[in-house]
Image (spheres, rainbow, N blue to C red):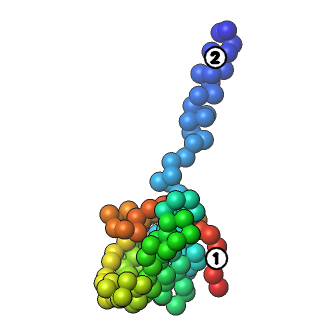
Amino acid sequence: MKKILFLMILFFPIVLSSCSSDDDDWIDLNPEDIVGTWSTGIEGTHKYIKFESDGTGYYALLSGATFVSNYLFTYQISGDKINIQITYSDDGNKLKGQKRVWECLFSKDVLKIKDGSLENGTYKRLGYDE
């Protein structure tokens, strides 16, 4: 019993040091790394974003396979923010011209939009675009 307790005490710090926080993996946004398709998942209500290399993009909110809303936008990256301007929307263009700022955390394959907007969520990369 003492050997087991000794081994647990010995390995406990090793186990703790080998676990890394998600925050350690966040990197700066840049236009080259953001290009591609991103999704919050495919079950229930989910969101989809596509960033093109020419500074344009597409956003969709879906319920199952049914579109709830979608729009086209242009974007620019500034620090940890993505500034978008909506250029077309499926709601009769009521959103056209609106500007939004998405405050983000970013790693290679995870984009977390965290600023209180409809687009909030943790998106995972579906693929790279060329």
The vertical placement of 41 against 85, above or below, is: above
Q: What residue lies at 31% left-to-right and 85% top-to-bottom?
A: 94
Looking at the rendered image, the disc whose residue lies closer to the viewer, 1 or 2, is 1
Determine whether, in the image, residue 11 is placed left or right of residue 81. Answer: right
Residue type, label 2: Phe
**Numbered circle sitting on residue 59:** none
Q: Quick one: quadrant of the C terminus?
A: bottom right
- Residue placed at 54% from the left, 85% from the top? 52
**Amino acid type of disc 1?**
Tyr
Between 17 and 55, the residue placed more toward the observer is: 55
**Mark 2 closeness class: few <14, some 14–19, many ≥20 residues within 10 Å:** few
Between 95 and 91, the residue placed more toward the observer is 91
Looking at the rendered structure, which numbered label has been put on residue 6?
A: 2
Give the secondary structure at mark 2: helix
Tell me where residue 70 appears, x and y as whole percent: 45, 79
Estimate the x, y position of residue 105 in percent, counting from the top left.
44, 63
Quadrant into which the N terminus falls? top right
In the image, taking residue 82 as reference, residue 37 lies left or right, namely: right
Q: Distance between the residues labelled 1 and 2?
A: 49 Å
Badge 1 or badge 2: first in the primary sequence: 2
- Give the percent coordinates (x, y) of residue 115: 34, 65
Can residue 33 be spotted in the picture? no
Q: Quadrant of residue 76?
A: bottom left
Crowd rating for badge 1 (residues with CA inside 10 Å; few <14, some 14–19, many 20+)? some
The structure residue drawn at horizontal position 52% and vertical position 90%, both measured from the top left corner, is 54
Q: Which mark is residue 128?
A: 1
Q: Looking at this rendering, what residue extends furthest in the front direction?
A: 66
| Res. 99 in view | yes
Q: Is residue 118 above or below residue 6?
A: below
Q: What element carries label 1?
A: loop
